[in-house]
Image: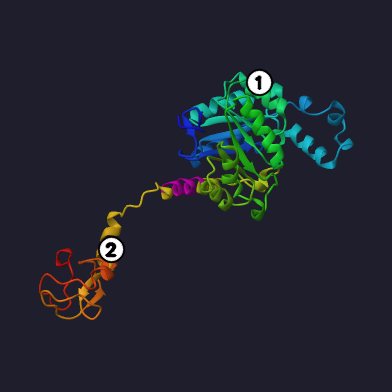
Amino acid sequence: MEENTIQIENDIIGSNQPCYIIAEIGINHNGQLELAKKLVDVAVEAGANAVKFQKRSLKDLYRNDVLEDPNIESQGLEILIQVLHEVELRDSDYEELIKYCKEKKITFLCTPWDKPSIDFLEKFNLPAYKIASADMTNLPLLQYASKTKKPLIISSGMSSLEEIEKTVSFLKERKIDFILLHCNSTYPAPIDTLNLELIPALYSKFGVSIGYSGHESGIVGTLTATNMGAVTIERHITLDKTMEGLDQAASLEPDEFKMLVKYIRESEKAKGKPIKKMTRGEILQKEVLAKSIVCISDIDEGETFTEENLGVKGPAKGLSPQYYYEILGKKSKRKIQKDQYIQDEDL
């Protein structure tokens, strides 16, 4: 494989590869297995490479006193823990979803929020792990995940550049394969806060593959990210943005997600290669629209070409007007009538 590429199942991810598109189902299934399957179907229909879920062990994520009374910390944490209690899938549901994804031929990915969740997911031999922005600075979790020898996809939202530098150094020292995702962890993120210029800047600074995890409304920001060099994108997907849930409002509905994938693939075709070559259509257009050097008066054999006897007219049947000033002062090899084209052999 090329330098700075990572393979996830049959997909190679890198700067010269098609963008790897992850449909983040996350907790938008609201704890319902059948809703989770419907979201998988939507991702498959849209043409995503992978779907991603989340796995937590709340007793390993939070102190006992916080779980018993979330009010002791903050109202935001109280709401979060209440929602997480309600939406966590059963262990058997994950097993069913992994099997379902295999049947639908789409890669199953998951974000483990703690070490026991990694242990649980390892039973299913996932091809990679996604690390949430909240854990980009959680070096013990990154170290634990790295022991699986699986590639890591790590979001960098809520982190300073100094924190990103420290984590990247940590991963490089341990020779861990990873992709870093630029991210703004605001739900939804205002379009003018995305700072997508960071994608090539992070690549230049760290020399690792950079992707994008988007939480903005609509698809313009994410499409721009792919054109800025993001090798993978991750967007939340939902059946309906008005459904209850923490991430629904910052998600894409089925038609939006499908349109995003379509535009990314069309954009990749438009990028093409750094080769300047006229297409057949351009050649035909050039014959009609481009110009030639012509005589604007009769010219005798041996007569000097001057601005008084030469002009430029269409179509492109004679010598290109790019050579106009080069032939001034030279003598004609033949007698040329007015409005005839100047040809190479006339010089």
- Quarter of the N terminus within the rendering: top left
Residue situated in front as seen by the camera: 223 or 251: 223
* C-alpha distance separating marks 2 and 1: 64 Å
Q: Earlier in the sequence, mark 2 or mark 1?
A: 1
At label 1, which amino acid type do we have?
A: Phe
Quarter occupied by residue 82:
top right
**In the rendering, at what x and y percent does residue 158 appear?**
72, 42
Residue situated in front as seen by the camera: 171 or 320: 320
Q: Give the range drawn in magenta.
A: 261-269
> Dot 2 corresponds to which residue?
286
**In the rendering, at what x and y percent does residue 182 appear?**
62, 42
Residue drawn at (49%, 27%) of the image: 9
Which label number is shown at residue 137?
none
Main SS category, magenta section: helix
Where is 142 relative to 335, above or below?
A: above
What is the tally of numbered marks visible in this picture?
2
Residue situated in front as seen by the camera: 205 or 56: 205
Residue drawn at (73%, 26%) of the image: 57
**In the rendering, at what x and y percent does residue 42 appear?**
54, 40
Farthest front residue? Answer: 329
Q: Is residue 166 left or right of residue 220?
A: right
Describe the colour scheme in one phrase.
Answer: rainbow
Q: Can residue 32 be seen in this view?
A: no
**In the rendering, at what x and y percent does residue 278 appear?**
31, 55
Frontmost of labels 2 and 1 is 2
> Dot 1 corresponds to which residue?
120
